[in-house]
Image: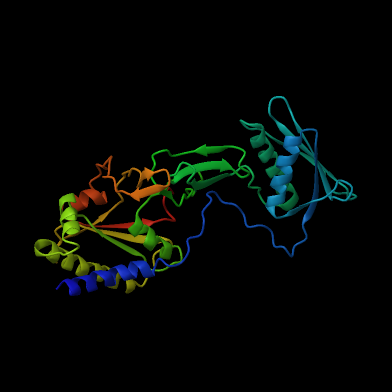
Amino acid sequence: MLNRLLGRVLGVLALVLLIGVAPVPAQTGGSIPVPYDPTVKRIGLAVVSSSTELAALLQNAFKIHGAFDLAPASTAQYTLRASLAPGGQVTIAVESKAIGGMSFTATGEGKAWYEAAYRAADEVVEKLTGSPGFFAGKLAFVSMRTKAGELYMSDVLGQEVEQLTADHSKSEFPHWSSDDTSLPYILSSGTVAGALEGAFWGLPALAFSMELPRERLQDLRHSHGKVEGDLEKSLLCAATRAAEFVRTRLEQTNPDPAPTVHNINFPSLTTTVTPVARTQPAKMKLGALFEQQSPACFSFRYMDQAGADPSPDADFNAVMRGCISHSVLDYSFLGA
């Protein structure tokens, strides 16, 4: 019986693992245009300023853009003369060497001098290329500098880095909202993360979990994974219901928008008639997932969830009511 049970459960888990083998593309947040085609002739620029910092910032910015090449003032198509006013305003006077060429002045303001420089540079980019610049945008990223995956935000050249989270949880996949005004992020879930990798490649993605009381987990540990009685029946039913979810998803004629994960959670007592509730992810936080044992050794630990979401359609609450929760995690829509 146990072998048949494990076979059915592992069959479901194999699907989750199979759809998670592709690498996840890094996300930096914001909308940064793809650099110009290398076959297109780039615009030669020279940056001149009495401020060494301002000149270096602008040179690095135009260097990473993709449409420009830095050149000496004697040979550049355009010379950019940048100046920084006492109030923080940055002015860039653009001079063309070509007869009848375009010459103009761009200005930018900001809370910091580099923000003003970015805005002025964006104006230069738009006038010279016809496309908006991106220097004044923001980058969102996850860093382990505090030994936990915290969320950070910075300008495009890293002049100022701001830590957005400090809850020692593992933040993943920062994604700007459609209007670039908010930045939701996903806390760690190994099951969802495995399915999410496949979802980023447009593959069918389902993640299955079962809620078990702590004492039942301890019993399983002491029995070396042997299951029997009500738990065995519940796992068999959950495996059968999971297979039904998979079959329905694979027969679906209209594919989900990528990346989408169907997150299904079973209550500890699952039967063939346990109702399914369409839910939303509960708003919860987990503590640190690793506990330091020595200066160079960390062990995994799972912290109980805190800050439960009171919403009746939250998946956690549906499972506590004895329902199977089914949340559709549309990662392209989060924060929109």
Classify 77 as above or below 105.
below
Identified at 21% across, 68% down, the residue is 239
294 on left or right of 175: left
- The outermost residue toward the left is 229
Residue 144: percent from left, percent from top: 47, 46
- The outermost residue toward the top is 86
Quadrant of the image occupied by residue 40: bottom right
Please, which colouring scheme is shown?
A: rainbow
Identified at 20% across, 70% down, the residue is 240
Looking at the figure, which quarter contains the N terminus?
bottom left
Nearest the viewer among 56 and 148 is 148
Residue 290: percent from left, percent from top: 36, 47
Nearest the viewer among 280 and 148 is 148
Does any portion of residue 273 appear in the rendered image? no
Identified at 45% across, 62% down, the residue is 200
Marks counted in the figure total: 0
Residue 287: percent from left, percent from top: 33, 43
Does any portion of residue 296 appear in the rendered image? yes
Identified at 27% across, 44% down, the residue is 305
Residue 102: percent from left, percent from top: 82, 47
Nearest the viewer among 245 and 288 is 288
